[in-house]
Image (cartoon, rainbow, N blue to C red):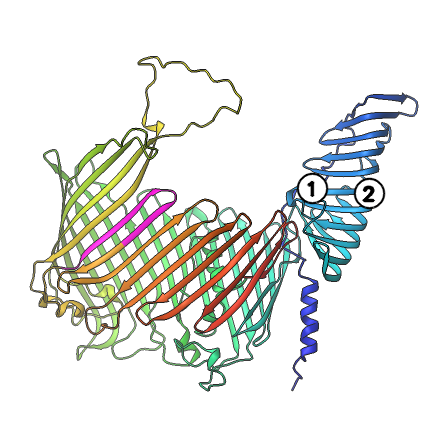
Amino acid sequence: MEKPPSPRHKAVILQLFLLLFLIVLPSTSQALIDKPDPHVNWHISAERGTHDYEKGLYIADGDVIIKGGTTRLEADHVEFNRLTNDARARGHVLLISGEDTVTCEALDINLATEIGTIYDGTIFIQENNFYIRGEKIEKTGRDKFLAEQASLTSCDTDRPDWQITARNVRVTVGGYGVAKHATLYAGKIPTLYTPIMGFPAKTKRQTGLLLPEYSLSDRKGLELNLPLFLAINRASDATIYADYMEKRGVKLGVEYRYILDNKSRGTVLFDYLDDQKIDDGTSATEDFSYTATPQRSNTDRYWFRLKHNQALATGWQAKLDLDIVSDADYLHEFKDGYTGFTGSHEAFIKNFGRGLDDFDDTTRANRLNLNRTWDAYSLNMNVDWYDNVIARRLNQDDTTLQTLPSFTFTTVRQQINESNIYYDLEAGYNNFFRKDTTDSLVNGQKSEIYPAIYYPMRAGKFLDIEPSIGLRQTAWYSDEYTLNQATNEGFSHRELVKLNLDVSTRFSRVFTPPPGNRFCEKIKHDLIPALEYSYIPDVNQDDLPFFNNQDRIARQNQVTWSVTNRFTSKKIKPAPTESPPGAAKIDAPPEKNTVQTTSSDYVYHEFARVKLFQTYYLDDLTLYEDEVRKDFNESFSDISLEGEFSPFTWLSLEMDADWSPRDNQFMQYNTGFTLKGSKKNSLQLMHRYKRERFEPVKQDPSETIYARLSATITPRLNAFLIHENDLFNRDKIETATGVEYHKQCWSLVLAYRDKPDDRSIGFIINLYGIGEFGEK
């Protein structure tokens, strides 16, 4: 057996990581010196000077300025050869090209090739606000510098809060800089030495090491993750991750990103870990599992995920989503970090508009979608595979329903010729497959078509009426199955009619707030009462196949009332431009009937919406086949409320609730608000409550509260507190607290997180211009 690393060896590994912590993510910065045109015309001005026409030599003194293209050279004394473009500058030298500068006491340089020597000077890279100082700096190319006895910092003061001193520094603008025998100083105190380090001076992507991640937790111990970025070509790149965990081993990962054209792109990620810990149910391993999942005996752990968009011919598009994980614990374990669930989910949402299933979902969706959209029609074709992680890992029978393939065709509501009649259509086909079947869970096919017509009309001036009728026709073909003690197979069908009648009206009133208010000019209140009647006849469906919930449609004979309130503000648009300070202003009375405001002169904002609704069941409820409603011996449903309120940018409230007249209590509600103040002051509070009334799902209520507070303590110090608690069980879900301290050239974030299954402490130190390291 291979001998495990000794504590001394681990310390050496840690030091190697620390030596590399300043090699950071590629950043964007302008080139220090734009490439000059060798044939550019140079313009010289000075207080006094001489000119040797034969040698082409200019000698100038006193506020000398040489300008050409985007380059500007200033000094007390300059000798410039217009034939060779060589310049020798002395005293208060300033060289500007683009947005970046070189300042020094003396400079010998060729303004065409930009090769020369800088004495006792400073290079300033503006994009990164980054300074490189040296006793002697050789400019070996247009974008290359070699500095001796140099220092690096992004602090603007002569006494920087941090700086890195080095024996010599080699910099390639548009690439990386390398410092040899470098020491990091906090103020005047040396804190870290490394024989070699890198830093960014980049204008484009380049291969190199990215920021490492650091953390310390109960489950993983010390964790160090060092990524390597690979710039493959202009259309693709990759990142390789080596994630060392003291208690778990080394997790290796790769992320590959590519762009094929404007509408075709993809991202692929894969992680693998040979875990040193398992969960076999003993007390020695139980800390390395999660109570919501079965015992984990595997050490081979992995996660593969992919998103791809592909443009096809004639307007077709394809989308591919893959999500395959080794075990049900994996996404619990690795939620954070570069390759964690949260980062992957957010990146997929940002780049593709679709994310991943929840981290605790043990059935992961994989899908291939082909779609085409026309002006009034759309067609979708899907191949869906749902990976049951527990069944696969434990080698159990897998009766998960797969859809291989499915087709859906829909139309938008559209008018029939010149009549006042409208129609729409939904049609679909599904081929259902299960890897393992039972007497009642079998394979089969389903097709459905659902056309509907609508006849909107108006009664008088205020009443809107819209009757509609739809016919849903469904056909199945299935293997032999047993349902309700009856055996069936082959072809079966069902026809259902749905009748609907919508009646609504609208009352509107415009209010004028008191003069001088800053909220708005006018407020419009819309009150919309409505009634909706729905009818679906009772059809015996006992002998029909059951693949999913859409295969059973309950009888409906009900009326739903609703009252919706909408509040919309109207405010004059702010002036697009303002007079600069000190500009003269002319006040003149407006001429009558010469200025007219239009709707484009105002900003409209619906700042509040409240909807209250309830359903009344006209039938004897024992007719319903839905088991949830069989024993509910009341004709009225819960009263539901939906509300949104956002009158100002600093305030937003949301609420939805269901209140039971029968039980005289709330069955569920979600309430929350967010307050945003100046700077980083904010408060967010969310309260969620839910209880079940019906058997067999009746259980204890769930009630949680989530709060996040961010506060500015001093101009440089911010603090945050996050707390989520299970109020019913009186258990803590998560608590996190931390502080952020920032100055002109650096910042520090220190955070502590406490969960029932793990505690961790992390930090992020950001040296502006160099980058940040750590993990929060």
Name the spot of residue 465 as percent of width and height, x first: 13, 42
Q: Nearer the viewer, residue 362 or 453?
A: 362
Q: How many dots with numbers?
A: 2
- Three-letter residue code for mark 1: Ala
Q: Quadrant of the N terminus?
A: bottom right
Left or right, residue 531 beside residue 386: left
- In the rendered image, the vertical position of residue 267 relative to residue 47, given as above or below: below
Does residue 447 appear anywhere in the picture? yes
Dominant secondary structure of the residues highlighted in magenta in the image:
strand
Q: Residues within 10 Å of mark 2 (few under 14, many from 20)?
A: some
Badge 1 marks a residue whose secondary structure is loop
Magenta residue span: 637-655
The stretch drawn in magenta includes residue 88:
no
Name the spot of residue 301 as percent of width and height, x first: 51, 74
Which label's residue is closer to the chain start, 2 or 1? 1
Q: Tell me whether circle 2 and circle 1 mark residues in contact (CB < 8 Å).
A: no
- Three-letter residue code for mark 2: Asp
Q: Residues within 10 Å of mark 1 (few under 14, many from 20)?
A: many
The stretch drawn in magenta includes residue 651:
yes
Residue at point 11%, 63% (across, down): 538
Name the spot of residue 699 as percent of width and height, x first: 25, 73
- Would you identify the image quadrant in which residue 551 lies? bottom left
- Would you identify the image quadrant in which residue 732 lies? bottom left
Q: Nearer the viewer, residue 151 or 141?
A: 151
Comparing labels 2 and 1, the label whose residue is closer to the camera: 2
Left or right, residue 168 beside residue 541: right
> Which residue in the protein does label 2 denote?
120
Residue at point 7%, 58% (across, down): 618
Name the spot of residue 139 as percent of width and height, x first: 80, 43
Q: Nearer the viewer, residue 335 or 174?
A: 335
- In the rendered image, the vertical position of residue 601 relative to residue 696, given as above or below: above
> Which residue in the protein does label 1 denote?
31
